Amino acid sequence: MIQSIVYSLELIKSEARQLVQKGVVSRHQPIYTLCRHIPAREWTWIEQELENNNFLLRDRIVDLMGREDWDND
């Protein structure tokens, strides 16, 4: 039995935040940049969820991430 992961918008945002925090991608890059870091077989589901929530692949990752809270040092 093949089990698929359900990608909610919140999960996608969380993945994007983690990749930005690790320095793997920049918040100013287009959302489609994330596809390099997500298995190809799962990208279709992510793309559909983004589309359902009115995101375009050319939108910037920062638009997807939304508001960020910063900790003061």
Image: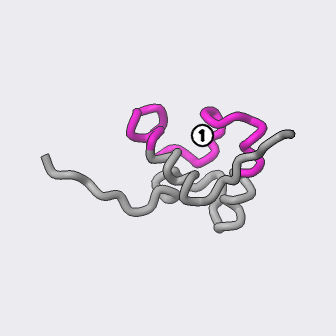
Relative image position of residue 70 (x, y in whole percent): 25, 54
Tell me if residue 8 comes above or below residue 23 in the rendering: below
Q: Residues within 10 Å of mark 1 (few under 14, many from 20)?
A: some
Q: Residue at x 63, y 62 (%)?
A: 55
Q: Residue at x 73, y 42 (%)?
A: 42
Magenta region: 18-45
SS for dot 1: helix
What's the amino acid at mark 1?
A: Thr
Q: Is residue 16 left or right of residue 56?
A: left
Q: Which residue is mark 1?
A: 33
> Closer to the camera, 7 or 2?
2
> Closer to the camera, 45 or 30?
45
Is residue 57 shown in magenta?
Answer: no
Relative image position of residue 38 (x, y in whole percent): 64, 37
Count of marks placed on residues = 1
> Closer to the camera, 8 or 51?
8
Q: Which quadrant, please, contains the N terminus?
A: top right
Place residue 68 in its image quadrant: bottom left
Relative image position of residue 50 (x, y in whole percent): 66, 59
Q: Residue at x 75, y 51 (%)?
A: 45
Name the colouring of the figure. Answer: one colour
Identify the main secondary structure in magenta: helix
Is residue 23 shown in magenta?
Answer: yes
Tell me if residue 4 comes above or below residue 25 in the rendering: below
Q: Residue at x 59, y 48 (%)?
A: 31
Q: Is residue 72 left or right of residue 42?
A: left
Tell me if residue 8 comes above or below residue 17 in the rendering: below
Q: Is residue 1 left or right of residue 62?
A: right
